[in-house]
Structures are given as structure tokens and as C-alpha cells.
Image (spheres, coloured by chain):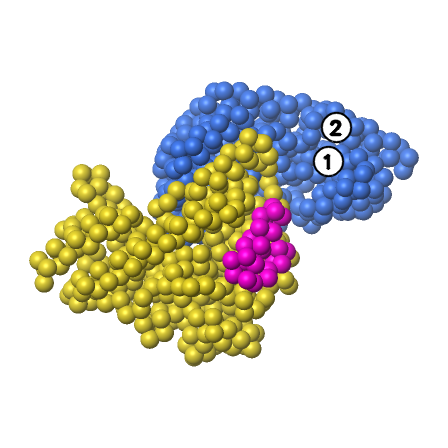
Chain colours: A yellow, B blue
Amino acid sequence: MEVQTAARALEAAGRSVVHMEIGEPDFPTPQPVLDAARDAIAKGDIYYTSALGIPALREAIARHYREQFHVEVEPERVIVTAGSSAALLLTLALLVNRDDAILLADPGYPCNRHFVRTLEGAPVGIPVGPETNYQLTDDVVGAAWTPNTRGALIASPSNPTGTTVALEEMRRIAESIAARGGALIVDEIYLGLSYAEGPRTALAISDELFVISSFSKYFNMTGWRLGWLVAPEGAVRDIEKLAQNLYISPPTISQRAALACFQPETLSILEARRREFQTRRDFLVPALRELGFQIPVMPSGGLFVYADCSRFGMDSERFCVEALKATGVAFTPGIDFGIHRAADHVRFAYTIAHDKLREGVRRLAAWLTHLG
Amino acid sequence: MEVQTAARALEAAGRSVVHMEIGEPDFPTPQPVLDAARDAIAKGDIYYTSALGIPALREAIARHYREQFHVEVEPERVIVTAGSSAALLLTLALLVNRDDAILLADPGYPCNRHFVRTLEGAPVGIPVGPETNYQLTDDVVGAAWTPNTRGALIASPSNPTGTTVALEEMRRIAESIAARGGALIVDEIYLGLSYAEGPRTALAISDELFVISSFSKYFNMTGWRLGWLVAPEGAVRDIEKLAQNLYISPPTISQRAALACFQPETLSILEARRREFQTRRDFLVPALRELGFQIPVMPSGGLFVYADCSRFGMDSERFCVEALKATGVAFTPGIDFGIHRAADHVRFAYTIAHDKLREGVRRLAAWLTHLG
């Protein structure tokens, strides 16, 4: 956030900035979704909906799981939410009592620990590195589990690392956690942006997981604030009550617009964009390695590369500041994602067009040559 | 909620139902707001905004306070939120630590105590009745205050009672709470729907209050999920951080649409609707009194009448069920709003057209005559 502010200030002062710090897709909302929103507004029915979301959208999401991921999800278990933020808050509000610990990967998405803390729970950041694909594993979860642990939250693909937990490992984790009477929450908001063949949802493993997703990333609907949660059947009624109290209902226009997300026309737009992100990743990772960044695990999804910058001889916060000053290239220090080896890492986002990515790499190359 | 479900089931079975249970205005979103939303969609800029909302909307809200309420509010203190639900959660998340008590009127809006509980605080419902206009007073707050008390939340006008705290009393409450080092939160989501001359915002008293408002009620934007918070200057930075973590940003289209709320054309539509609500209230309250309901305090704002039904010889839950069965008139039992004398009270909403209100009263009259 601070990098973004500094980058915008620099830009306002007339400097050319290459934005590799921005965590949202650069593509506009697809036209069929915009058209559906306009239709909804023309019809004027913009009252509250059910707290769980409009039935047609819950059914469309369930169908999407069947068609894209070959997994059966009952529409009754799909809860439409005001962004994945609301899905996460509802899940944690249901699960976390005071001082309950939730295990999280460090590095990870920084908001997650704030959600847990807001609910008076204890976020426990577990240091992860390349040896576990920057993800929790069954062994790591088992070693960190204590009598106070209520569950684990795994983002797959992850922000900032872009790495994915293999389904076999996810199954081991889910089974161990279930055996301990805990809960597994899987954040799949970047699942649609997977670059490996046949991405797999954790819902293939068990009906007892909490799986969080979003219309913001793959579907390019950031500002619409719409996401969803797939919950175990036994949790739906309690989540409905929480949602009624804490949110009333998700935004109505966004829900009606999102119905258009699952049309073949929209999906073909989105698949072309996914391939474009993959092309950017395929350019950026080797280019950064060439510059001297270490990226031990190829990111398999999402929008980010998490790179070790320790060989450049400054801590990552200073490295980001100096790079921005010297080159106008903005990217994010590790400290924004945790504390484990944060000073050695930076996150690059590939949420800009290919020619800008090239320009960013070119500027960094010149600066680093000069530095080194 | 259960009454609403039962009423809809009855309707689906072919019965004619008069809906006096619905807590949202029956008017559609004003046309200039719909037009502004369509323009925003056409422009396609539907990315995340600042977590505090777009600057133009924060300025428009500040201007609205100056023009409608003759109170100066710095735009920097206005925080646009995903509905007043988010404004309340952010405020309470900032203020409430575990076991901190928040004083609330009983009867009151039921979600409020759930917010406090979700944050591991202790909601303390204070029984209030006609002797204090169904509101907290300085004396009542003073008597209930303990070392664990963090603050009080006052809804003025209130749901379900429609009563307002006079500005002089609000000032006494604010000063006593400040002297105790506590915080006063004032929920003004129904302030625009005030039927007394010159409604007064609590912001006239002090810059150190937390004032919550909404685009849902007066502005008829329920499903858009947009509200706002005016916070003390010293709290804004912390609330911004919380908002970034818990919500990212309020819905973008809703924010751009809401800019049209403050145009003279929109305000004149809304003022006509406010007068229509007033006319409904002026019909309904005497009509209910005529039927034998006791309404000791004339509601001065909002959409509801809170009526004592004890003379009809059944508890209010049964009364609602029997009335719905016998007459098809739906309204809400007191238990939905607290526990204090809940079995003696029901809430009627005047969110239906005048002829339907008349029909509801006619049906109730026939049934009650038959009963009595």
C-alpha cells in the first residue's frame, strides 16, 4: 500500500512509473457482465436479496464447479458474499472463539491475520519456504498444532507466492485436521488463474471444508465486491444467521451481473485473459532470474512472483524504495506479507501489459548492472 | 424474518397478504441514481477504490451535512462503507476489546448486539420504555456504566420504536460518556426520514462521536450496500487500516451512483417520499390506537410503529401468528428486537402504500372485534 502511494506520488510529479505493485487484474469487467448489470438497473429491482444470495447465482456457481472442475457441489452449500472478504469473515466468525489459533503460511495474504485478530483469535504464522512450495504441508500443520488450534487457512494458489498445494497433499492435510476435530479453510480466489493443466478445487476432497472464492480475480469484477463461500452443509444455517446480522445481503446489482460470468461468451474472454497472464508469467520469471533474483519455485497460478532479492545487498524495504527512486519501477517488499525472511523478498505483480513488463525489466537491469 | 417467511409461504399458497413486516422502503432507487450507475458502468472503471471511498462522494456527504443539517464536517472524517453494517463493524472493531461492554437500548435493532458479540464484546441491553421515549438517557447510561463499559450505541430515530433522542439529551449523554473516557456511537440511518421540523444530527454536538449513516433508507438504495461513518479525526487512520483489511473498498458502482443522491432533482424526489411516509404514519398511529394498541410515544422518524398489544390477551409471538393466519396481515413480534417486555409488543412497518395500510387496519379491526 505504501509503495503504491509512493508510486502514485512519483507519477503525479511527472515521473514515468512501471506499476508492478498492483494486486488486481488490469482487465476491465467483461462486456456481457456489464450488459447484465445494465439490464438489472433498467429493471430497477435493486432491493435486498436473501442473505445467502440469489438462488440463480448459487445454482450457477454450483454448475460451474461441475462443468469446470468436475465436482458436485449442492447449490444449498454455496453462499454468495460481499467479496471474499465477507466469505472469510463469516467463516472465521463461525469457527474462531477467543484465543483459538488459526494456522497460516508466512508469507501470506496480510489481511488474513487481521481477520483472525479482529475476532479475538490468534493467527499463527508458520514460516514456509521453497522446500514446501511456500505452503503449509501436513507435516508442518501437525507440528504446529496445539490444543488451542482451531484450524488452518491455506491459500492455493497463494498471494504472494503463486504456488499451489497439490491435491494429494491437501487431502492429507484435510484428513489430519479432521482427525484432530479442526477445520480447514481453503482460499481459492486465484484458482481460476491457474496455469497448470486441470486445476483442482479442494472441494474434490471433502464436503466438510470451507472454500472461499471471489469474482474479483478470474472474473475481473474487483470493485463489484462479490465472492462466495462453499460451506459444509451443517454450517450453512449458522452462516446464514451471521450473514443476516453482519451483512444483510451481498450487493444486488453485482449478483445479477455475475450471472453473466458463466456464459460461454464470458468464459472465452476470461480464458484468453488467463492465457495472457500465463504468457506474462512465462516472460517475467526467467527475466527476473536472469537479473539475479532467486525464484526457486515456479508460481503456478495467480498474479505474482515472490522473488528473493538478498543478493543485491540491501533489505527488501530499502531495495523497493531505492528501485522506485532510481528506476520508477514499483513493487512490494516482503514485510507486507509476513515476517519470515521478509527482508529478503519482494513481490512482483504481472498485472500490466507485456510491453510494460519488458520496460520494467529493462529499467531494473540497467539499475542492477550499475549497482553491482 | 420468520414472519416474513411465513407471510411469503401464505402468499405462495394463494392468500392475500398485507406486508407490515418489511423493514425496507418500498420506493425504487431514484432515477438520477440509476442513471449515474448506468454511466459508471458505461465508463467501465469498476476497479477497487480507496478503502475510505471515492473523494468526490466523501465531499458530497460533507456538503450534505452543511446544507441539510447546518453542521460542518470535514470530508476527511467521512468514511464510505459497504452499508451501515460495515460502518458499525468498523467502529466496534476499533473500540471493542474482549469483554468490553457496549450499552444498547432494549428494544433495539437486533443485529447490533450480534456485532458486539462477534467481536467478543458484551452487549448490554438496557430496558427502555415510554418514560424515556424508548431511548437511553444520560441517567440511564450513568446508572448502567461499569468499569468494563466502553461506550453506548444509540439509534436515533430508532428501529423498532421510531423515537428520537432530543439534541439536548444527546449532548448530556455525550458529555458524560466523554467524561468517563468512553465512546458514543450514534446510528442515524433513519435521520433523513424524520417527521419533526429541522432534524438534528448528533454531529452538531461534538467532533468526537462516531456517527453511522446509510444510503439504504432515505436514499432508497438498499441492495446497493452503501453507507458511511463520520469518525473523530484521530480515529480515521485506524479505521482506514481496518477497512483495508476487512473490506478492501466499498462497492464502486454504488459509490458512483450515490453521487447523484445529492442533486436537487433527487432530493426533491426523496423529500416527496419522506412526506408520503409521514402521511402513512399520521394515518397508522391513530388507527392502531383506535384498535386498542397502546402507542404512548408518537414515532418521530423511521418506518415503524412499536405498539403494545398486551390488551389482546396473548403474547406477541402468538398474536403475530394468529393475526397472520386469521387476517393475512404480517407484522413482527417484539422478541425480534430484544427481551424487555417483548411479549407485549409488536412492530408495524409502514413500507406499503396507503391503500394497503388501510386494508391491513380494516382486516385487523374485523378480527379484533371478533376476538374481543
- As for residue A37 lying within the magenta part, the answer is no
Residue B207 as seen in the image, left or right of residue B281: left
- Between marks 1 and 2, how big is the CA–CA gap? 8 Å
Q: Residue at x 16, y 64 (%)?
A: A312
Nearer to the camera, B298 or B190: B190
Q: Residue at x 69, y 50 (%)?
A: B339
The residue pinned by badge 2 equals B356
Q: Residue at x 71, y 25 (%)?
A: B354
The residue pinned by badge 1 equals B19
- As for residue A62 lying within the magenta part, the answer is yes
Residue type, mark 1 in image: His
Contact between labelled residues 2 and 1, with CB atoms less than 8 Å apart: yes
* Total numbered badges shown on the rendered structure: 2
Residue A80 as seen in the image, left or right of residue B38: right
Q: Mark 2 or mark 1, which is nearer the start of the sequence? A: 1
Residue B338 as seen in the image, left or right of residue B187: right
* Residue range highlighted in magenta: A52-79
